[in-house]
Image: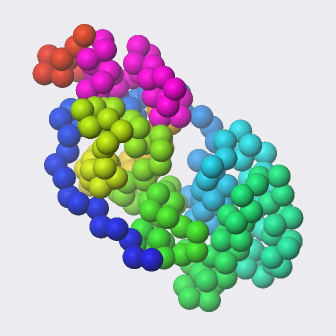
């Protein structure tokens, strides 16, 4: 299906401080996850499919095992469906394995075995939604494109659109995400998207926003309010 266009929006107030503080925190606190050590598009894609609706700790136990069995997209494309499902056994949601298998065959047949690098092409592949397309473009190809999953959406909503709360539209969140990462192709795009995702997973969680320990609280509308600091008066580091 065609990718949705992301409206162009101005960078939010204190976006530069938000990025600076976030990246500094991520350098010291980001988890050493196996899929963060690679830019191989196939390996990144496998990780993203596994991470759909599955906790990181569970995926870590299966990621290497699956790649040992199917180390390349070509190897996966040539495999039998039943064998792919067997390699996926234990992760659940087997439709993800079916989609990944179909994707490998489509890429081999229609793209010469090369996974596309642009979100608008990635989103047309089996099992790839808007987030996964952005994640592969950013984490494999270091494109300056937003990758907004549940964690990132929560951070953006609390930091920049607190008055909208849960009513913040998908369109608004993606526009803000695009503005935050715009013009940062390369390692900076990779690091920012990984960092904001990590913040949502570890600090700005669904159950509780740990504003007291959040590294971006002075650049966050919600965090600064809880800390008794106005955005206009907050000082940089």
Closer-to-camera residue (153/196)? 153
Q: Residue at x 61, y 83 (%)?
A: 106
Number of marks present in the image shown: 0
> Can you see residue 160?
no
Q: Is residue 234 left or right of residue 56?
A: left
Residue 159 occupies which quadrant of the picture? Answer: top left
Quadrant assignment, res 229: top left
In magenta stretch: residue 93: no
State the residue lying farthest toward the bottom.
Answer: 109
Q: Residue furthest left?
A: 232
Location of residue 185 with respect to 228 vertically, above or below: below
Among all residues in the image, which is located at the extreme top?
A: 228
The image position of residue 127, as x and y in percent, is: 58, 69
Q: Residue at 66% across / 71% down in the picture?
A: 99
Judge from the rendering whether residue 35 lies leftward or rightward of residue 21; answer left or right. right
Residue 18, by quadrant, is top left
Can you see residue 130? yes
Looking at the picture, tell me which residue is in the foreground, 72 or 174: 174
- Compared with 191, 233 (above or below) is above
Query: Between 136 and 32, which is closer to the camera in this rendering?
Result: 136
**Can you say whether 18 is above or below 168 in the image?**
above
Q: Does 221 lie within the magenta span?
A: yes
The percent position of residue 237, horizontal first and vertical second, equals: 27, 19
Please state, as top left, top right, bottom left or bottom right, where the N terminus lies in the image.
bottom left
Q: Residue at x 43, y 53 (%)?
A: 147
Identify the image's colour scheme: rainbow, by chain, secondary structure or one colour. Answer: rainbow
Residue at image x 71%, y 71%? 98
Q: Position of residue 22 (x, y in %)?
A: 38, 32
Q: Which residues are magenta?
A: 200-227
């Amino acid at each position: 299906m065609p990718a949705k266009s992301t409206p162009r929006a101005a960078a939010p107030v204190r976006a530069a401080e938000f990025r600076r503080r976030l990246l500094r925190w991520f350098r010291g606190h980001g988890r050493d996850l196996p899929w963060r050590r690679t830019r191989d598009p196939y390996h990144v894609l496998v990780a993203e499919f596994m991470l759909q609706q599955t906790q990181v700790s569970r995926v870590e136990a299966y990621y290497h095992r699956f790649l040992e069995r199917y180390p390349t997209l070509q190897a996966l494309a040539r495999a039998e469906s039943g064998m792919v499902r067997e390699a996926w056994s234990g992760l659940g949601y087997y439709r993800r394995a079916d989609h990944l298998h179909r994707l490998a065959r489509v890429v081999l047949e229609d793209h010469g075995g090369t996974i596309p690098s642009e979100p608008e092409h990635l989103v047309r592949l089996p099992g790839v939604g808007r987030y996964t397309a952005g994640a592969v473009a950013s984490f494999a190809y270091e494109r300056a494109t937003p990758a907004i999953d549940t964690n990132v959406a929560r951070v953006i909503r609390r930091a920049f659109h607190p008055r909208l709360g849960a009513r913040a539209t998908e369109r608004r969140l993606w526009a803000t995400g695009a503005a935050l990462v715009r013009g940062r192709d390369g390692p900076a795009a990779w690091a920012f998207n990984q960092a904001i995702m990590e913040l949502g997973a570890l600090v700005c969680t669904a159950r509780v926003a740990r504003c007291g320990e959040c590294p971006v609280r002075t650049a966050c509308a919600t965090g600064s309010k809880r800390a008794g600091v106005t955005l206009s008066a907050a000082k940089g580091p």
